[in-house]
Image (tube, rainbow, N blue to C red):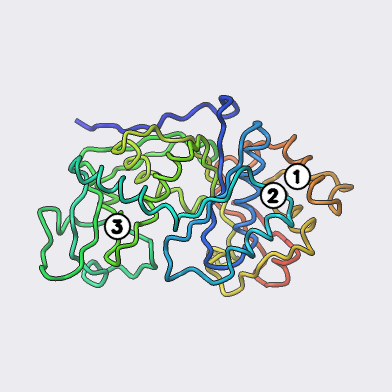
């Protein structure tokens, strides 16, 4: 019999007084058009519903952190009028919380140690990424005397179901996705566990982020239930891509957004999200643009849209020219 592990989403448009959202960039570079879209979408959703908008810097993956990137991200958000509530949270200062959660998972029998290398698994992935795992070390590490990663043991009969506010009903078979890493061989806590612990600790009720993270949501909900935490509601925004369909943030053409072009960039993002402002506001201040957008915000115009396409030149991205949406 299939055991269904379902999220507990609230119907879109109906939120409690405890709405808490967040934006959680990684300081691996400056904000570009794609990350600005995620920031603006999460900000507007929070403000439209009278909620809080928290800022979390996901700087656990220290080998990938670019010096000075955090400060530039903060300055850019402020220049664009995206003002957060409360203090900035830094994952690098919260290791004790992640280790406590990891111990809770171990005590509950939810983890195992894995000695497999990426080469053995045929994985050519970047740091922090994962894919389906064949269960090689489920009964114990197959090699001794080597560093091990800690993996979350997905239940064989577990199906995660949840209703995404933008992308609609979602279905994830955990064993098909595979047991995923929660602590890397180098000792760094993996993204999947850290983000779940942070969302729980900060009482995040609404996660609004890019559609590239939609596949991770099944793993994160499984972790939330293993840790005894109800999942938040999810809304996955369209991803900005090149004409080649490559994610903008990974493109060699990706360029930082410029505070001097704040009104133009914000107008571009709003158009990508089908929230086109009146013509008289297109060259107005970020504060007035965002105030209009927060009052008129709706996810319905881009419901089911997974990606939006930007012109394949740096200059076009700076000016925010857009081709189409899928």
Q: Which residue does the image show at 24% across and 32% down from the upper left?
A: 3
Q: Secondary structure at mark 1?
A: helix
Mark nearest the camera among 1 and 2 is 2
123 relative to 254 in the view: left or right: left
Whole-percent x, y for residue 257 in the image: 69, 64
Q: Are marks 1 and 2 in contact (CB under 8 Å)?
A: yes
Q: In the image, residue 105 lies at what x, y percent?
A: 25, 44
Q: Quadrant of the N terminus?
A: top left
Q: Is residue 319 above or below residue 169?
A: below
Rendered location of residue 199, percent (x, y)? 45, 42
Reading the image, the residue beneath label 2 is: 82
* Precedes in sequence: disc 3 or disc 2: 2
Using a 10 Å C-alpha cutoff, classify the residue at mark 1 as few (fewer than 14 neighbours), some (14 to 19) or many (20 or more): many
Q: Within the image, what quadrant is residue 52 found in?
A: top right
At horizontal 27% and vertical 65% (from top left) the residue drawn is 185
| Mark 3, residue position | 183
Residue 109: % across, % down: 18, 43
Quick one: SS at disc 3?
Answer: strand
Crowd class of label 3 (few under 14; some 14 to 19; many from 20; radius 10 Å): many
Nearer to us: label 1 or label 3: 3
Q: Nearer the viewer, residue 213 or 49?
A: 49
Which residue is disc 1 drawn over? 290
Dot 2: element:
loop
Depth order, front residue of 166/284? 284
**Label 1 to label 3: alpha-carbon separation:** 39 Å
Q: Is residue 233 positioned above or below 268 on the image?
A: above
CA gap between label 1 and label 2 equals 8 Å
């Amino acid at each position: 019999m299939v055991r269904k592990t379902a999220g507990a989403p609230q119907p879109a448009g109906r939120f409690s007084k405890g709405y808490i959202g967040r934006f959680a960039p990684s300081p691996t570079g400056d904000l570009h058009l794609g990350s600005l879209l995620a920031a603006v979408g999460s900000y507007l959703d929070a403000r439209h519903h009278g909620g809080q908008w928290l800022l979390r810097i996901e700087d656990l993956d220290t080998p990938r952190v670019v010096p000075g990137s955090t400060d530039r991200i903060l300055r850019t958000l402020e220049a664009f009028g995206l003002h957060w509530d409360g203090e900035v949270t830094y994952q690098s200062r919260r290791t004790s919380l992640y280790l406590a959660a990891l111990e809770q998972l171990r005590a509950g029998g939810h983890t195992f140690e894995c000695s497999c290398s990426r080469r053995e698994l045929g994985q050519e992935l970047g740091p922090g990424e994962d894919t389906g795992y064949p269960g090689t070390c489920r009964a114990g590490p197959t090699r001794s005397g080597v560093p091990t990663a800690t993996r979350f043991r997905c239940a064989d009969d577990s199906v995660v179901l949840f209703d995404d506010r933008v992308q609609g009903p979602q279905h994830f078979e955990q064993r098909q996705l595979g047991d995923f890493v929660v602590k890397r061989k180098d000792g760094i806590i993996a993204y999947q566990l850290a983000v779940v612990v942070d969302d729980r600790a900060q009482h995040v009720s609404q996660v609004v982020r890019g559609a590239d993270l939609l596949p991770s949501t099944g793993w994160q909900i499984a972790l939330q239930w293993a840790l005894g935490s109800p999942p938040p509601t999810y809304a996955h925004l369209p991803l900005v891509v090149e004409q080649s369909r490559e994610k903008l943030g990974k493109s060699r053409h990706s360029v930082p957004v410029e505070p001097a072009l704040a009104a133009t960039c914000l107008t571009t993002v709003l158009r990508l999200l089908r929230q086109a402002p009146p013509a008289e506001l297109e060259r107005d201040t970020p504060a007035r643009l965002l105030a209009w957008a927060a009052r008129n915000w709706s996810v319905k115009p881009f419901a089911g849209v997974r990606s939006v396409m930007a012109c394949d030149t740096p200059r076009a991205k700076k000016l925010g020219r857009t081709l189409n949406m899928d």
